Image (cartoon, rainbow, N blue to C red):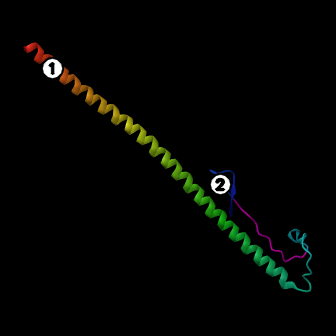
């Protein structure tokens, strides 16, 4: 099975069939000039190489898909953390401003009380 790439975010699993090329009339061999009757091991070697290459390609696609998914997840986590930091910073600044305002009101009230007491 392999991964079909539909974009940077989505990978759709797919199935790849690997057909044996033991028949010298196979479609995969149309572009090659070979005489398998004289050297039958050439066709077998080509099949083994093709099989190994396709398996390796599938493994690389799988690793790429996994890394892409991890990068996407980390990007989303970073975005969410940034949004949370912005919300917490705003909440902290509002609480700080409220505390400063309360202290100023207390200072002004205390100064007014002292003025009235004189």
Q: Is residue 62 above or below residue 78?
A: below
**Residue at horizontal 46%, vertical 41%?**
83
Q: Nearer the viewer, residue 85 or 36?
A: 85
| Residue identified by numbered label 1 | 111
Give the main secondary structure of the magenta stretch.
loop
**Residue at horizontal 74%, vertical 64%?**
16
Mark number, residue 64: none
Q: Is residue 68 above or below residue 84?
A: below
Q: Earlier in the sequence, mark 2 or mark 1?
A: 2
- Magenta segment: 14-24
**Residue at horizontal 52%, vertical 48%?**
76
Q: Nearer the viewer, residue 90 or 14?
A: 90
| Residue identified by numbered label 2 | 11
**Residue 89 is inside the magenta segment:** no
- Residue 43: image location, x then y, percent: 84, 80
Instruction: Quote the CA–CA distance across marks 2 and 1.
Output: 69 Å
């Amino acid at each position: 099975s392999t991964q079909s790439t539909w974009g940077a975010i989505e990978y759709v699993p797919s199935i790849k069939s690997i057909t044996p090329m033991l028949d010298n009339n196979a479609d995969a061999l149309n572009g090659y000039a070979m005489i398998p009757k004289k050297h039958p091991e050439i066709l077998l070697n080509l099949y083994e190489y093709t099989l190994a290459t396709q398996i390796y390609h599938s493994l690389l696609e799988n690793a790429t898909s996994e890394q892409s998914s991890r990068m996407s997840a980390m990007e989303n986590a970073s975005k969410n953390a940034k949004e949370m930091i912005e919300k917490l910073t705003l909440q902290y600044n509002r609480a700080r401003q409220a505390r400063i305002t309360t202290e100023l009101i207390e200072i002004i009230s205390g100064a007014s009380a002292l003025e009235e007491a004189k």
